Each structure stands twice: as C-alpha cells, then as structure tokens.
Image (cartoon, coloured by chain):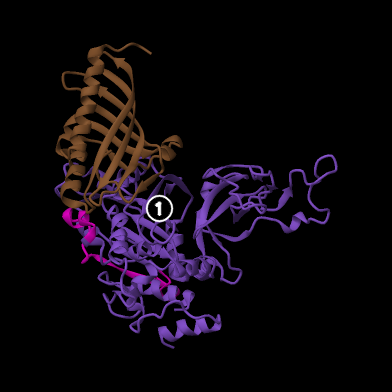
Amino acid sequence: MAEVSDSVRRQIEALNTRYIRAIDDDAVEEWPKLFTEDCLYRITTRENFSQNLPMPLMECTSRGMLVDRVFGYRRVNVYEPQRYTHLLSGLVIEPIDATHVRCRQNYAVIRTMVTGEMMIFSAGVYHDRIVLGAEAMFEERIVVQESRRVDTLLVIPI
Amino acid sequence: MTELAGGCLLAAMRNEEPLLSWPKEGPTRAPYRVMHDPDIYRQEMDNIFRGPTWHYLCLEAELPNPGDYRTSFIGEVPVIVCRDENGDINAMVNRCAHKGALLCIEPHGNRKQFACVYHAWTYDLKGDLTSIAFQRGLAGKGGMPKDFDVSKHHLVRIRVENFCGMAFGTFSDKVENVETYLGPEMAAHVRRIFNRPVEVLGYYHQVLPNNWKLYMENSRDPYHATILHAFYATFKLNRLSMLGGVALGKDGWHNLLYSAAERDIQKENYEGGHLRSVIRDVGLEDSTFLDRIQEFDDGITVAIQSIFPTCNTQQIYNTLAIRQTVPLGLNKAELHWTCFGYKDDTPELRRMRQAQANLIGPAGYVSMEDGSVGGYVQRGTAGAEDEASAVMEMGGRTIEPQPGVRATEVALRGFWRAYRELMGY
C-alpha cells in the first residue's frame, strides 16, 4: 500500500468530521455539500453486498437526490424524532492518483429516541472514493451495514 | 349465520371457551386486546400458523440446485426449505429430532445432508434420520437401545406446494391445495406477477415494533396510503381519486389492492415495446429514479396482494417483491422482503428497478412509515380496557369486492373474518 501524506490524511479526516457533524448535529442540509455533483451514495447490507445483489436500501446517484432525501427527512416522511451519534474507526487510505483516493472505515451509529431508548442502529464499513483538495469531497460513499436487519425504519442517512 | 355465531360455533365444535368475545359489531371492530394478550398469541400459533393456512417459504428460484437450502419460518417455527436429489422441494422444521437444536444456522447454503452440530444426528434432504453418532456405543458399551427405530425419528415434515415458483408450506393435511386456497382471482394475480422466470435482486429485513397483525392490517389498507405516505401526495404520484380498487379472495381472507397511475405521467413514449413514463417538475431535484415502464398490459402500476395470513406480493411501479411477516413475540415482528426481477430484464429495466428501490423497503419514500405506524398503535393500545376496539367502517360494513373503491377498509374486515373463523371468536 502506497504511503499517503499527512496532508491527505488530514483532508480525509476533516471531510469525515464535517460528515458526522452535519448528520449528528441535525444540520443535514450541509450533508449533500460534501458530495460531488454526480456522486454515488448507497446504503446496502453485507447480505446483499457479498452476493452482488443490486437492490439498495437507499441510493442517490446525484447531489440532487441527496438534497431530495434531506427534503424527505425534513418535510415529507413521517417518523418518530430521533438523533444519530456516529463513531468512526480504522481508516485505510489507498491512493488512486494525485487527486483521488479510496478509503475504508468502520462506522457505528447509535440511535437515540425521544423516549430515551438508545440502540446501535447500524454498524459496518464505509467504502469511499474521495476527490482531494482544500475541500475534499465524496465521489462515492457506499455504506455496507453489517447486519441485514433495519430496526423500524431508515430516514436519516448513515 | 352471523359472524359472531359462526365464531362461537367453531369454538363450540372444538369444545373450548373462546378467549375473547368479539364485539357485536362484527368485522368492523377488532379489540385492541388481540395485540397484547399472550394467551391469544399462543392460540394464534396453533390455530392460524399450525392451522389450515398456507405460508410462503421462499422462491423456487432461490433453490436452483439439488442440496440448495434456505431457512424460513411458519409463524415462529423455524423451517428448512431445500431441493433434494430428485429436484423436489421439501420443507421440514429446522429442529433436530434428538434435543431440538437448530440444524441450519446460516440463512442459505448447499448441503448433501443436514447434520446436527450437537450430537451429529444426520438427516437426508427429505428429513429422514440417516445416522446417529455412537448408535452402537463405544467398545460395546452405551449406545442406543437395540430396538431404537431411526425411521420414527425424522424431522417434522411440512407439506409443500410450489405455485408459480412460490414455495408454500403448511402444517395442515386438511387445507385444500394452494390454488384453491387462493381462489381464482388471487391465483390469477400470482400468475400475473410470476408470468416468467424470476431472479432475486436483494433482500431487506425490517424489525417492526408491533404485533404481526398490525402489519397485515396495514398492507390491506388503501385508506392510509396517500395520507401517511405523504411522498405520494407531495409529489403527485398517487391520489386516492385514481383508478383502482379492492379484489377479494376466499371471502376476504386474501385481497388485492390495485391502482393505475397513468394520469400522473407527464411524458410517455414507447421504448422496446414498453410504455415508458417520465415524471418531471414535481418538486424533486432529481426525479430520474421515478422513470418507469409499464410492464403489465392491464395498466396497473401499484398492486399489493395479501395472502392470509402473512404473505404479501408487491408491485410498486417496477419494483417487485414478496413480503413475509414473521412474529417475534407479542410486540415485535420481522418483515422479510425478497425483491426480484425477471431473468430476461434488459439492463435498463434492471437499473430502473434498482433506482426505484428508493421507494420501497425500510428506507423507502413510500413505505418507511409502515415500519413505525404499527408501533404507534401497539403503544397507543397498551393497557386498553377490554372492550376498546379499532373501528373499520370505511367503505361500509360488508366484505365484498369493491372495484373502483379505494377509500375503504373492506380488506381489513376480510382479515378479521379469516382470523375469527380460525380463532373461534
């Protein structure tokens, strides 16, 4: 594996920090801004991913679709108030070229309901393709949830 | 014979006191207690899940080769479905005949035989016991009694029928065949969906925070669709005023909710022999995931079928799926979705099915709410007084097919008719 510079690592960590803050601080309007215009954001499960089964839980193939998901969450879909707490670990960076990298990283999302109920809602691996720069962005984020189960519903992006 | 008398008569024939006396209004009411009473739940496992009913187990397409198996459920009972050396599909309870341990832990795989990890009792693909470890003991000591008859200790066999590529199972030797059980209209709809070979495109598994029956009600309820699922109305995709209706099978045990959405289409053209619909300018930044083709000649764009007790077939535009609801105790159920397409799908149609996945499943724009609304009812009805009941008079009080009617709860009344017949209430 080729070495990546500290500067590249810092760009990626900063992008992931902005990602977590956008979702966990309920500032989801900031979330689509972290992706390129013709990005891919997909949530799937290990069960489907490992068997190459294409049906995703959620799939956005443009930044516009991310904006629509935010609109759905804010204005359209009906669900019980809930918040996420993201935990990240085990970042691996593989350079593609001078301005692009692939990354893998574990994530866990703890979901907290207004009743006080907390659970590990999702845990798995982010498979990313990132374009580097002063403001690095996701070209691709594929979320592979380890469990095949989703509790109740999935409305906030993971 | 009134609804109430019918229920009581059945209970009397079984020589047992009903656990519940149904409200005098009949099938327009369902007591909240049926969502909370552990004795009723236990009786459901016997009377409904082990009763004269058929249960979807898996698709034939998931078992292409001899030895292929999948695990499934009938009610709470774990089940193995497999294809044997002769190509036949068998099903048996996933429970060793020795100590009752689960035989298959993995959800799917291929086996020549099923060996229990606990004491290596081994079964063939028909469920017959073929060997017992140390049957003759060690060095002439121990072992099973000489008269122990392995042929009497097979796995509990489940009657299986393959209807149009759907494998159904039942514990009942009395229930009619699947086609008769469904009735002509419902069988015709299964044939419509499974008109040619299918291929699985993915699975969803959704834990519902409610009694299993609340999801079965929900999937029979066209009244809520455009209210709860605000995405439909916000983006003008489905209105209660659209063409559609309710068809019934077996006097309401089963049903089909259908609608046709051609009025919402803004641009149509024929592509590859299919009518292609494009929806733009509805307020979405990127609505390309709603692009669809009309796959069925009848013009129906959304069709949700309920096969009593816990199976749904689904067509929402170009998404096709089977949904199986598995009870996980009184207050919890798991919804298993098997999404599929046809083997001869064009790459473009495959992409459409995949893009439209955004509509369905636990994160679906028009389905996620079904995951939570049952929980609201479960929690709202906790501790309710004995006589408190749901009211279902939308669309009248009878149980008859209602073509052209969508503001109706007739299919829910059908569910409760079947339920009461089997439960003796």
Against B202, is B328 above or below? below
Query: How far from the left and from the top, in percent, is residue B72?
Result: 51, 52
In reply to whether residue B30 is colored magenta, the answer given is no
- Residues in magenta, as a range: B228-254
Crowdedness of circle 1 by 10 Å Cα count: few (<14), some, many (20+)?
many
Q: Quadrant of the C terminus of chain B?
A: bottom left
Q: Nearer the viewer, residue B140 or B2?
A: B140
Secondary structure found at label 1 = strand
Against A114, is A99 above or below? above
In percent of the image, x 40 and y 54: which residue is there? B335
Which residue sits furthest bottom? B1
Q: Quadrant of the N terminus of chain B?
A: bottom left
In percent of the image, x 27 and y 64: which residue is there? B380
In the displayed structure, does residue B335 sit left or right of residue A138?
Answer: right
**Mark 1 = which residue?**
B321
Which residue sits furthest right? B140
In percent of the image, x 53 and y 80: which residue is there? B16
Which chain shows up in brown?
A
In the displayed structure, does residue B241 sit left or right of residue B70?
Answer: left
Query: How far from the left and from the top, in percent, is residue B6?
Result: 46, 84
The chain letter for the residue carrying disc 1 is: B
Q: Amino acid at mark 1?
A: Ala
Against B227, is B272 above or below? above
In reply to whether residue B235 is colored magenta, the answer given is yes
Which chain shows up in purple?
B
In the displayed structure, does residue B188 sit left or right of residue B230?
Answer: right
